[in-house]
Image (tube, helix red, strand yellow):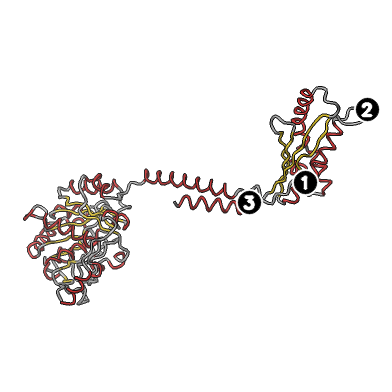
């Protein structure tokens, strides 16, 4: 559609910029003079003459004479190019067309051409010593005054522009599709990884700024997507479901940190005690996303033995979420994350909480995520729709296997809303508003206390946006 619009716009612009040209048409009948003793030969003679007269009509001499007679500023060559003579097939009729930027001047030039041509034919076809010409030229259609321009043909140009724009648009779309190696749909994830994505998180512009789920969108598609991840983790392998989960991505800005934060919050929804660990020791984001003290003791302080893991945790929201921020950034993050001390920290957090969510750095950018992955029960890989390339997602999944960690699945993040609505049949299945309002009036709703706002429910969601 965009190609058609551009094609129409270009055609309209060119049509507007092209000077208007008008045409005046006249027709001349050529015949022999004298008694028609042999009509067939006379007619054949006239037809042969008609062909040769085309050269006379478009000659520089005739154009020069017409320009001089009318006082035109055009050169003989320019005027000659404006005159077209065509013999009508099977007849002795010459059709002459004169074009000019003025309809009136085109008619005036055509009349002068007819007059000058008739004089020249008389001169050329009068034998020496003869009284008159052997050829007679008569005007059977006087030069007309046509006020409709013959150029540019706006309708034709628009049709050609639209068709060309459509063709170019389709070609570009095909080339883009062939050149685009990013993942777009659940089918792409399935094709690359061999597994169904655990959740499809729709795009939401508000999370690009806030990063934390809002109680205002507790019935949104994004909320359901995070609940799907929570359900998958809690029911995977029955009683032995993973309790320490690493959330990572192939490359930066795919939304892994936002997914990790909101997953941790969502896990508290059913009363679970959850620990969220910021293990991105190069570009930590958890403290900023949750509005916590970034200068408070964090993971690196615990790993260095400066503080106990129980003292470093900061409580957030309804009290069931404990956050261990990154702390001071170390010189060798991979060594710190792959150390025995890191294993001990995760073990301690596992003993004190029902679930531990670890926000890790991108899998392909640095080796840090690969260092901590074997210390967890499994890895969730976040891919960003229309951005994460297929080969990068495949490599990230392979990297999880190479370090002998378990892949729990792929979360396709920031799926375009149109694609998300298409998968849900074009609508969101929401609760009955009348009954929900009645429950709220009776005080039946349970609202956990949110961070800094007693009325905020930190679990009901919007969409995890970019990191």
Residue for badge 1: 109
Q: CA distance from mark 2 to mark 1?
A: 33 Å
* Label disc, if present, on residue 18 of the rendered structure: 3
Quarter of the image where one finds residue 339: bottom left
Q: What's the distance in space between the residues labelled 3 and 1, CA to CA? A: 22 Å
- Which numbered mark, 3 or 1, is in the foreground of this view? 1
Q: Residues within 10 Å of mark 1 (few under 14, many from 20)?
A: many
**Residue position for label 2:** 129
Q: Nearer the viewer, residue 267 or 381?
A: 267
x, y percent for residue 279: 20, 60
- Sequence order check, earlier mark of 2 and 1: 1
Q: Residue at x 21, y 64 (%)?
A: 262
Disc 1, SS: helix
Q: Where, quadrant-wise, is the C terminus in this rendering?
A: bottom left
Name the secondary structure under disc 3.
Answer: loop
> Crowdedness of circle 2 by 10 Å Cα count: few (<14), some, many (20+)?
few
In this rendering, the answer to whether 283 lies above or below 173 is below
């Amino acid at each position: 559609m965009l190609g058609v619009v551009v094609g129409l716009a270009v055609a309209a612009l060119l049509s507007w910029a092209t000077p208007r040209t008008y045409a005046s048409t006249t027709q001349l009948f050529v015949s022999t003079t004298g008694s028609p003793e042999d009509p067939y030969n006379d007619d054949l003679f006239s037809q042969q003459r008609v062909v040769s007269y085309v050269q006379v009509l478009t000659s520089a001499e005739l154009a020069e004479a017409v320009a001089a007679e009318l006082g035109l500023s055009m050169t003989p060559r320019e005027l000659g190019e404006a005159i077209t003579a065509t013999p009508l097939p099977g007849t002795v009729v010459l059709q002459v067309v004169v074009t000019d930027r003025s309809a009136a001047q085109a008619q005036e030039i055509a009349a002068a051409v007819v007059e000058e041509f008739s004089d020249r034919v008389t001169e050329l076809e009068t034998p020496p010593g003869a009284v008159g010409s052997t050829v007679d030229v008569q005007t059977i259609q006087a030069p007309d005054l046509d006020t409709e321009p013959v150029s540019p043909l706006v309708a034709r140009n628009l049709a050609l522009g639209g068709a060309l724009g459509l063709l170019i648009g389709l070609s570009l779309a095909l080339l883009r599709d062939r050149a685009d190696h990013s993942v777009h749909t659940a089918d792409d994830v399935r094709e690359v990884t061999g597994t169904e994505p655990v959740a499809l998180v729709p795009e939401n512009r508000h999370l690009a700024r806030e990063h934390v789920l809002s109680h205002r969108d507790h019935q949104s598609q994004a909320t359901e997507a995070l609940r799907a991840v929570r359900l998958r983790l809690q029911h995977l392998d029955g009683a032995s479901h993973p309790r320490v989960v690493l959330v990572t991505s192939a490359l930066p800005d795919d939304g892994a940190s936002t997914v990790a934060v909101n997953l941790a919050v969502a896990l508290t929804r059913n009363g679970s005690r959850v620990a969220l660990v910021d293990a991105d020791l190069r570009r930590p984001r958890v403290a900023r996303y949750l509005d916590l003290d970034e200068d408070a003791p964090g993971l690196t302080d615990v790993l260095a033995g400066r503080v106990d893991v129980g003292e470093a945790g900061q409580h957030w929201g309804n009290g069931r979420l404990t956050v261990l921020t990154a702390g001071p950034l170390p010189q060798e993050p991979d060594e710190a994350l792959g150390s025995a001390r890191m294993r001990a920290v995760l073990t301690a957090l596992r003993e004190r909480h029902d679930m531990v969510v670890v926000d890790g750095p991108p899998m392909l950018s640095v080796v840090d995520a690969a260092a901590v992955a074997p210390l967890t029960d499994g890895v969730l890989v976040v891919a960003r729709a229309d951005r994460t390339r297929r080969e990068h997602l495949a490599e990230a999944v392979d990297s999880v296997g190479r370090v002998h960690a378990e892949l729990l699945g792929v979360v396709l993040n920031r799926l375009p809303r149109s694609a998300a609505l298409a998968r849900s049949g074009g609508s969101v299945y929401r609760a009955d508003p009348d009954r929900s309002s009645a429950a709220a009036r009776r005080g039946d709703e349970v609202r956990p206390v949110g961070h800094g706002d007693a009325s905020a429910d930190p679990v009901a969601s919007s969409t995890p946006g970019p990191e």
